[in-house]
Amino acid sequence: MDRTLGSADKFELQQNYRRFLKYQEQFSLANEALKDARASRVWVVGLIMLLFALASDFFLGASAALFGLYFYRIVLAWYQSSQAEEGREQMERWFAGKGLKFQGRILYFREDDMLENPVDPFDDAIYQ
């Protein structure tokens, strides 16, 4: 199926394609940071220090700081991940409005159910 896009949308399509790839990369990195933050065992050290907190205010403060650090890293990574996901979804909606869809990082026309003909937004042949 030979389908074309309007030449007036060429610049905007290419820019939004680049933005989508940027958001996709940010989402991947933020998701990895979130996994690392959740896998951190700082809370275990905080719990052990909490046991020593009965004898000293210093250990109570250190324990609270470690718990605070653990949850701060999780919240920060979650926030960055949600921001990147929101930008990516906004770009996907824009492309859906133009009759296009993404499968991973590859762009296709919405009617291409078999995903046989990827669309290259930098190829001048797809613009009329």
Image: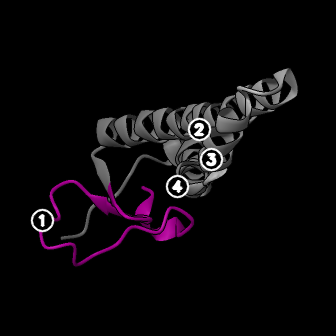
Question: Is 14 located above or below residue 2 in the figure?
Answer: above
Q: Which mark is residue 74?
A: 2
- The amino acid pointed to by label 4 is Lys
Quickly name the residue at label 4: 35
Range of magenta residues? 102-128
Q: What colour scheme was applied to this rendering of the protein? A: one colour
- The amino acid pointed to by label 1 is Asp
Q: 114 or 8, which lies in front?
A: 114
**Is residue 106 shown left or right of residue 33?**
left
Q: Where is the N terminus found, in terms of image quarters?
A: bottom left
Q: Secondary structure at mark 2?
A: helix
Report the Cα–Cα distance between label 1 and label 2.
38 Å
- Seen as rendered, the residue at the extreme bottom is 116
Quickly name the residue at label 3: 15
- Seen as rendered, the residue at the extreme top is 57
Q: 55 or 88, which lies in front?
A: 55
Q: Secondary structure at mark 4?
A: helix
Q: Nearer the viewer, mark 3 or mark 2?
A: 2
| Residue 110 is inside the magenta segment | yes
Q: Which mark is residue 113?
A: 1
Q: Earlier in the sequence, mark 3 or mark 1?
A: 3
Q: Earlier in the sequence, mark 1 or mark 2?
A: 2
Most common SS among magenta residues: loop
**Is residue 99 shown left or right of residue 120?**
left
